[in-house]
Image (cartoon, rainbow, N blue to C red):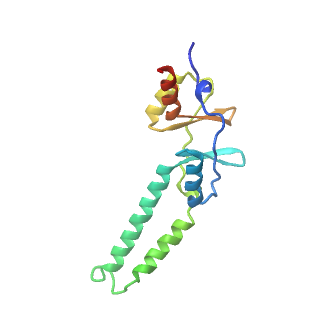
Amino acid sequence: MTLTVEDIMQKDVVTFSPTLGLDVLEQELSQCGVSGAPVVENGIVVGVVSRSDIVKQLSVEQTCAVLAYDYYEAPVLYSNERVDVDEIGNAVGQRIEHLTVSDVMNHTIISISPNLPLIKAANLLLEKKVHRLLVLDDGKLVGILTTTDFVRLYSSQNK
């Protein structure tokens, strides 16, 4: 018997709104025990968000802050104008406070059918270098398949 995606996928899928703030997103990810999830707006999957997306964005914000600080701390090269370092920190902090899921999510949706053989799904995970695949049936989100699902399957078969 060939196992399919439907045999091991998670059917109870945690989803997030693109307007959700990143601070709330991190709390929700922790509470739900997941590292990422589909982003759904008006019943339509519009992307995927994960903790690594949050980390990447925070890294970008930090780099921007460092560049701004360096710019204003080098008056000989750029200008005689000095800016209070606290102003830079406050501006970056305010920007981070207002970031939402939409600002950091991946808009590329990698989806599979529930009747896809597991070996093909596994190969797709490897090929695309992702940890989750969205399971869509006629465009509707019906599940999610993650690398953890494969570990769980392997573990249950080798007890």
The x, y position of residue 105, in whole percent, is: 54, 51
Q: Does residue 149 lie above or below 158 as drawn?
A: below
The x, y position of residue 95, in whole percent, is: 52, 69
The x, y position of residue 93, in whole percent, is: 49, 71
Q: Residue furthest top?
A: 1
Relative placement, left or right, of 129 versus 42 is left
Give residue 24's quadrant in the image. Answer: bottom right
Front-most of residues 150 and 81: 150
Q: How many marks?
A: 0
Residue shown at the point (49%, 38%) measured from the top left: 131
Residue shown at the point (45%, 55%) measured from the top left: 55
Q: Residue furthest front?
A: 159
Q: Does residue 22 lie above or below 121 as drawn?
A: below
Residue shown at the point (63%, 50%) measured from the top left: 16
Q: Does residue 53 lie above or below 145 as drawn?
A: below
Q: Residue furthest bottom?
A: 80
Relative placement, left or right, of 31 versus 72 is right
Relative placement, left or right, of 42 versus 19 is right
Q: Quadrant of the N terminus?
A: top right
Give residue 44's quadrant in the image. Answer: top right
The x, y position of residue 142, in whole percent, is: 67, 34
